[in-house]
């Protein structure tokens, strides 16, 4: 196997990885990487499986789905009224 470039010796772990190791060492609750200690609701995983099976499987439009943007606008409208 070829040796790695000397430049790679400057690479370090991310802060998130370091915090994970510290949390594991002390048995702490790990809030650094989104490791919940519970499963999501079954209704959510069922719906995700359904959507994944339907497709299309592609990137969303840059500006987001129209219905999602409208729902966000409705939800936050009261924060921005003049």
Image: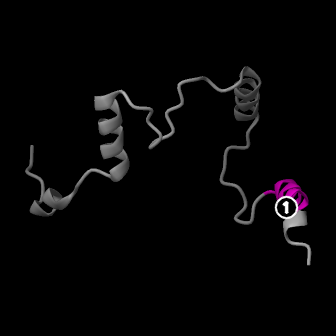
Give the secondary structure at mark 1. helix
Q: Is residue 28 left or right of residue 11?
A: right
Local packing at callout 1 (Cα closer than 10 Å; few below 14, some 14-19, many 20+) is: few
Q: Residue furthest bottom?
A: 82
Q: Locate residue 71: give its quadrant.
A: bottom right
Which residue is rendered at x = 73% and y = 61% of the image?
61
Q: Is residue 47 magenta?
A: no
Q: Is residue 49 left or right of residue 7?
A: right
According to the image, what is the colour scheme of the structure?
one colour
Q: Which residue is mark 1?
A: 76
Q: Locate residue 24: give its quadrant.
A: top left
Q: Which residues are magenta?
A: 65-76
Image coordinates for residue 63, horizontal then vertical, percent: 74, 66
> Can you say whether 23 is above or below 66 in the image?
above
> Can you say whether 24 is above or below 71 in the image?
above
Image coordinates for residue 39, horizontal then vertical, percent: 61, 23
Q: Quadrant of the C terminus?
A: bottom right
Q: Nearer the viewer, residue 17 or 23?
A: 23
Which residue is rendered at x = 47% and y = 40% of the image?
31
Q: Locate residue 1: give its quadrant.
A: top left
Q: Is residue 22 left or right of residue 70?
A: left
Q: Identify the main secondary structure in magenta.
A: helix
Q: Residue furthest top?
A: 42
Image coordinates for residue 4, horizontal then vertical, percent: 12, 53
């Amino acid at each position: 196997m070829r040796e790695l470039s000397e430049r790679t010796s400057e690479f370090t772990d991310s802060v998130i990885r370091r915090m994970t190791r510290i949390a594991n060492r002390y048995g702490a609750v790990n809030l650094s990487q989104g490791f919940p200690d519970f499963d999501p609701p079954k209704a959510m995983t069922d719906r995700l499986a359904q959507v994944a099976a339907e497709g299309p499987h592609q990137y969303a439009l840059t500006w987001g789905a129209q219905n999602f943007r409208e729902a966000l606008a409705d939800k936050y409208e009261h924060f921005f009224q003049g």
